[in-house]
Image (cartoon, rainbow, N blue to C red):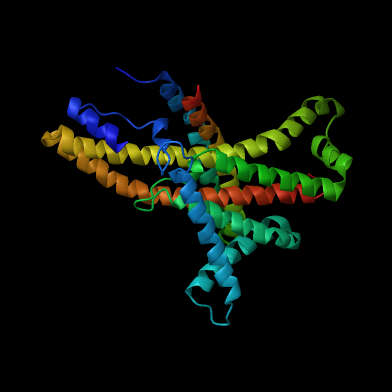
């Protein structure tokens, strides 16, 4: 982005607004290799989350240190705030998975506002896709195991207490909604929240830079300053959205698992 | 004027979810104001409703870039 930007500025200052192309990164180790910046972020995030929870669990002391306190607060928040609230005591089995999922998504999201990293790895669709597929497999497997194959689909597609004729409409809608729409929206929600957030930040920062340095003049300096100040506010807002979206992803996964576990839909 | 008509369409499409999210949080604030002790229960429901309404806007921006 920086390269093309300076080239354009030299030709005659024309602002090129950020677009989907800014999410494509070249390989780090030059042409022909496949390892890109989002991949690096994922590897680092995985190691960070693993080390955090490993250390927090291994050196468990009665008086927790900083690392243990952090690990335990994340786990406690997901266990009590999400697993217990949505699934009851049965949900405690899933608390470790949900806590790991939450920590992993938060780390990947928050990399979008960490200086010098500044790319939310979850804005590449492959990662949310994979996480959504895992969630989908888990809640469908739990449902089939709890209610039997036929029972699960019967409870899902033919909830009792509804006029017979409505089933013609309701059954296919419920089937499509549970098996296809649920993982699809899980995936799209996370991806495009991060995508749109990153795009807005790019627009404010690059636009502000352009107005200040290239356009100049009273109008350019005033508008550029406002834009850059706005970008600081938006960065904090993005941080809030990033944590909220991780929470929403985990909450919805927990709700879907809870719904598959209970008999009545 | 340069630009993509998709974005105008997305702007129009975002009105619906915007109103929806506003209504959801209005109801949430109302509920908490009437019964502050119900806050924990309402919070999960409000976030869930917000996520479902927001999904429409998010699908919209996805399609605006894809189509």
Marks counted in the figure total 0
Tell me where residue A132 appears, x and y as whole percent.
Answer: 63, 43
Q: Where is residue A141 in the image (x, y as percent from the top left)?
A: 78, 46
Residue B23 can be seen in this image: no
The x and y percentages for residue A128 are: 57, 42
Question: Position of A22 compared to A53: left or right?
Answer: left
Residue visible at 64% across and 63% down in the picture: A79
In the rendered image, the residue lying farthest to the front is: A32
Q: Which of A88 and A61 is in front in this view?
A: A61
User: In the image, is residue A43 above or below residue A211?
Assistant: below
The quarter of the image holding the C terminus of chain A is top right
Determine if residue A27 is in view.
yes
Give the farthest residue toward the left. Answer: A217
Q: Quadrant of the N terminus of chain A?
A: top left
Relative horizontal placement of residue A135, taking residue B46 as reference (left or right): right
Give the percent coordinates (x, y) of residue A202.
Answer: 34, 39
Looking at the image, residue A262 lies above or below residue A60: above
Which residue corresponds to the image point at 51% horizontal and 26% vertical from the top-left? B63
Foreground: A168 or A249?
A: A249
Could you tell whether A94 is left or right of A61 in the image?
right
- Where is residue A5, by image quadrant? top left
- What residue appears at the point 74 percent right and 63 percent down from the top-left corner? A89
> Residue shown at 52%/59% (left/top)?
A47
Look at the picture and state if A33 lies above or below A52.
above
Name the residue furthest top: B1
């Amino acid at each position: 982005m920086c390269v093309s930007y300076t080239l354009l500025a030299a030709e005659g200052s024309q602002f090129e607004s950020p677009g989907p192309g800014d999410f494509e990164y070249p390989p780090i180790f030059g042409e022909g290799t496949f390892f890109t910046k989002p991949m690096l972020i994922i590897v680092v995030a995985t190691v960070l989350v693993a080390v955090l929870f490993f250390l927090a669990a291994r050196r468990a002391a009665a008086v927790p240190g900083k690392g243990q306190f952090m690990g335990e607060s994340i786990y406690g928040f997901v266990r009590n705030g999400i697993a217990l609230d949505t699934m009851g005591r049965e949900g405690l089995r899933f608390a470790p998975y949900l806590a790991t999922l939450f920590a992993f998504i938060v780390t990947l999201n928050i990399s979008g506002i960490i200086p010098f990293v500044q790319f939310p790895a979850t804005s590449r669709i492959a990662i949310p896709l994979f996480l959504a597929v895992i969630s989908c497999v888990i809640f469908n497997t739990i449902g089939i195991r709890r209610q039997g194959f036929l029972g699960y689909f019967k409870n899902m597609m033919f909830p009792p207490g509804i006029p017979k004729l409505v089933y013609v409409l309701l059954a296919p809608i419920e089937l499509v909604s549970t098996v296809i729409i649920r993982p699809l929206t899980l995936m799209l929600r996370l991806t495009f929240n991060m995508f749109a957030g990153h795009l807005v930040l790019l627009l404010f920062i690059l636009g502000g830079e352009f107005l200040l340095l290239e356009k100049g003049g009273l109008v350019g300096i005033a508008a550029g300053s406002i834009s850059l100040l706005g970008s600081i506010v938006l960065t904090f807002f993005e941080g809030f959205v990033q944590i909220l979206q991780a929470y929403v992803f985990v909450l919805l996964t927990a709700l879907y698992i809870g719904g598959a576990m209970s008999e009545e839909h | 004027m340069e630009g993509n008509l998709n974005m105008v369409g997305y702007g129009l499409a975002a009105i619906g979810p915007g109103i929806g999210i506003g209504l959801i949080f209005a109801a949430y604030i109302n509920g908490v104001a009437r019964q502050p002790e119900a806050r924990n229960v309402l919070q999960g429901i409000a976030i869930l409703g917000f996520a479902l309404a927001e999904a429409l806007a998010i699908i919209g921006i996805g399609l605006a870039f894809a189509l």
